[in-house]
Image (tube, rainbow, N blue to C red):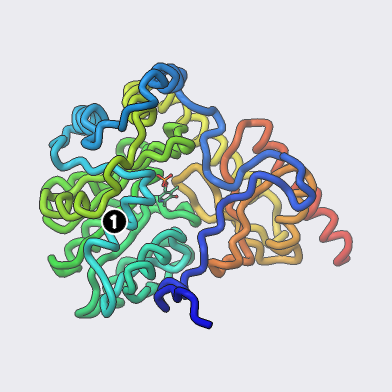
Amino acid sequence: MTTPAPKPWIAAIAPYVPGRATTDDGRKVVKLSSNENPLGTSPDAVAAFEGARRDLARYPDAGATILREAIAAKYGLDPARVIYGTGSDELLHMAAGAFSGVGDEIIHVRYGFAVYEIATRRTGATVVIAPDKDYATDVDAILAAVTERTRVVFVANPNNPTGTFASRQEIARLHAGLRRDILLVVDQAYAEYLEPEEDDAGLALAMTEPNVLVTRTFSKIHGLAAERIGWGYAAQPIVQALHRIRAPFNVTSAGQHAAVAALADDGFVEETRAHNAHWRDWFANEIASMGNAGLRAVPSKANFVLIVFEGALTGEAAYAGLMEAGYLVRWLPGQGLGHGLRITIGTEDECRGVIAALRAMVRDTVAEAG
Ligand SMILES: *Cc1c(COP(=O)(O)O)cnc(C)c1O
């Protein structure tokens, strides 16, 4: 008996595993597994979202005009070159889909964002993995991985799941080292968490260079993950190619209105950024103070911290122990990070609770070993 057969490159895709919201035994606990905003959403954005409910029978504006214009005004861009997606996830798929296919290669870093691999395989292209440098993006390793078949390079900056950051100089060096027919995608999902002076200048490159696509999202600092809104910026020919394969009405009406209001609420963004910077640094210091227990916080510029477990307490045991204590974090054995946990920076209470639970586990593990 024959049945419809997915293409072999589709069958080879390992499905995306989202951050969990419930424990093994079904308890609803604190979710620190998806890098969502612990402060919620701008009240202005919530009000705009509520106000958009009148128009449920109408399709949204397919051109996302108010959204493009608000983004362009905010960042000094040409609204005609702003592309938008059902989350920035859709933009990543469009970038791979428009510029690669069977026989082509797409590069991303080891310990990169899981969607890159799925977006690459979906087009039939080959995944090429550039080794990391102690979990961080290694520009030389990426450039060394380029072949005549390379079509796209995906770099998240700050990177997920590691939180590491490549400087403006490193991103410029990466771009300068790539052929002009290779699309460099700088995924800035966490850019708003950086201090203004830390900007990697990806948007400046996208303004002037023919082969740079920057992607951004409303899911992280703007607290609109439920509405699925992302945007990007690139040269006009790149943007036109992406429009060809974009879903026709890919951003909802309520989402467009909520995003415009979120973009205008600088106070909320600044409050979130400051909260995150304070508690992220506190969190990393607490891990560092656990002495020789073998825990290490990878330096992060994002709204999460990757902890690697190199001592008696394993990543798997810590994952289970945190779940028991009421905290769901991200354990990523499928991405070669069975020895690591990615933990979203939550509220003060949540940060303190996670650290207390980790301290207790470290103490118990040492006592057992002794
Ligand atoms: C969260 C995330 C995204 C995608 O977010 P959307 O919700 O699809 O906009 C993209 N890239 C990275 C690196 C992320 O962590």
Q: Amino acid at mark 1?
A: Met
Percent from the top left, x then y, of residue 334? Answer: 57, 67
Would you call the spot at circle 1 few (<14 residues within 10 Å), some (14-19), or many (20 or more)?
A: many
Q: Residue at 34% across / 76% down in the picture?
A: 126
Percent from the top left, x then y, of residue 355? Answer: 70, 43
Vertical order, 45 against 198 (above or below): above
Q: Is residue 127 visible?
A: yes
Vertical order, 4 against 232 (above or below): below
Residue extending furthest front? 1
Vertical order, 38 against 129 (above or below): above
Q: Is residue 111 left or right of residue 260?
A: right
Q: Quadrant of the C terminus?
A: bottom right
Q: Residue at 49% across / 76% down in the picture?
A: 3
Q: Residue at 37% across / 73% down in the picture?
A: 127
Residue extending furthest bottom? 1
**Residue 365 in which image quadrant:** bottom right
Name the residue nearer the viewer: 279 or 184: 184
Pointer 1 residue: 94
Q: Secondary structure at mark 1?
A: helix
Percent from the top left, x then y, of residue 166? Answer: 35, 55
Q: Is residue 309 left or right of residue 279?
A: right
Q: Residue at 35% across / 51% down in the picture?
A: 90
Name the residue nearer the viewer: 367 or 104: 104
Q: Is residue 203 left or right of residue 44?
A: left
Q: Is residue 340 left or right of residue 126?
A: right
Q: Is residue 284 visible?
A: no
